[in-house]
Amino acid sequence: MKDYSIAELQKIKLHFIGIGGAGMSGIARIMLAKSIDVSGSDAKDSQILLSLKTLGAKISVGHSAENIGDAQLVIVSAAIAENNPELVAARKLGIPIASRATALSWLLTESTSIAIAGTHGKTTTTAMLTVALQSAGEDPSFAIGGTINSAGTNAHSGSGKFFVVEADESDGSFLAYKPNAAIITNIEMDHVDHFQSEDQLFATFNDFISSIQSGGYLIICGDDPGCQRILTEKSLQGVQVITYGQNPENEFQLTRVNLAPTSSSALIMQNGRKVGELNLLVPGLHNLLNALAAFAAATSLGVPVDRLLSGLKSFTGTRRRFELKGEVNSIKVIDDYGHHPTELVVTLKAARNLVGAGNLYAIFQPHRYSRTAVFAAEFAHALEAADFVYLLEIYAASEKPMEGISSLLISKKMNQSKVKFEPSMLQVVNDVSSAAKPGDLIILLGAGDVSSLSGPILEQLALN
């Protein structure tokens, strides 16, 4: 596959298979802003498709070979099956086919690119860095796996020199980006459908670090065991390494941490010298660390400190990251994308801090059979932080069912008085709405369609 410049892309017609996904739609949005001819298809209609259509894309609902039309280049989502009729037709016609990550890498070449990677926190960190740069007077381009609350979008073609991109390691495709700077928030085993071992995972992150352009920056969490392993294993020549965290050995350090129910704050030290006060409107130590990573990256690129801190102070979160969906009769309903045991631990800790003396009800939908099979015990342990847990059946994503693997694996490892395995979403809505009392908190957890329950739960609470 050849590399395309933006000028070359403006002269041809592109077709996106699976254009409605978060990553694909973001790239399509940026390409449309750059006057590139875009068409695309997705299995189901959505608000995202309508938005892209409004921006000038030719959109088809449903997959058919005819949708390819006279496309000269096809971009395909990783979620698309090999027997998809459009993919089959493109191959038969000899049309070049590129992955989502490859297409995004073409857009980065004319900017100073910052790629944010890590097992946890990359969406929030990417959004924080974007908002901080905007507050500093920059107009960065960005492509994020989640929607920034204040912007209402997950992608933008900016007029500034920076391009901020979330770098997803799940299939190794982030190696295409070759950024000028990179952040690694943490490294922990996940995506067991792709990575067969920890050694394979770390080898991929080593390759990602090697892809940073010479003279660039690596901002990495010095507190994280996975990041520490990378730092000891890899020879980091040609790249300036900047560590951050709570330990005093880090170049950027958090001190005087204060964790409130709906906010958080800390002092930022650089090499033992105070450089500013970090105040966030989002809770949790993990978010302070995410913000510190964004701060370290931006200051390393020469952005003024005061404006960065002001921007981070204005950050109100991203969709599906500890997002308050509503409150009825003093019962809060929060939606969170967390789908790894470590993410559940920090999210439920923040939820417990927020609910105080009230009861914490968690509705968890495991994501993928492979992840559930490997982490069932860890999920059970993390969920014990809630007062009661409703377990939905596994959201398969693109996986086929695995024999003997269901949410019951998690349920059986928990205190039976604190958990109910309930595949019926309607029943869960009724159960949790009846159980919750004023002062309680209901949190939806998972990367699947569990988020769709927030509306029905709030409606039912209003009727009680």
Image: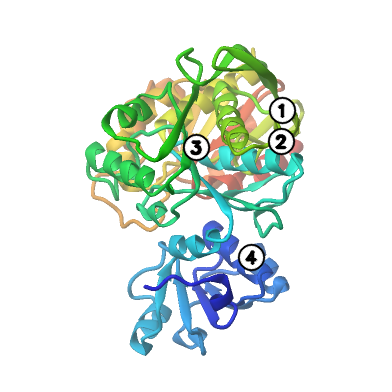
Residue under the point 58% across and 38% down: 124
Q: Is residue 358 visible?
A: no
The residue identified by callout 1 is 281
Alpha-carbon span between mark 1 and mark 4:
29 Å
Quadrant in which the N terminus is drawn: bottom left
User: Which quadrant would residue 322 be assigned to in this image?
Assistant: top right
Alpha-carbon span between mark 3 and mark 1:
19 Å
- Residue type, numbered disc 1: Leu
Whether tag 1 and tag 2 are in contact, CB under 8 A, the answer is yes
The residue identified by callout 3 is 338
Please state which of the two labelled residues, at mark 4 or mark 3, is closer to the viewer: 4
Could you classify mark 4 by the number of other residues whose Cα lies within 10 Å: few (under 14), some (14-19), or many (20 or more)? many
Q: Residue furthest top?
A: 256
Q: Helix, strand, or loop for circle 2?
A: loop
Q: Image height check: is 43 above or below 151?
A: below
* Residue 308: numbered disc: none
Give coordinates of residue 273: x percent, y percent.
61, 13
Q: Helix, strand, or loop for circle 1?
A: loop
- Front-lying residue, 94 or 140: 140
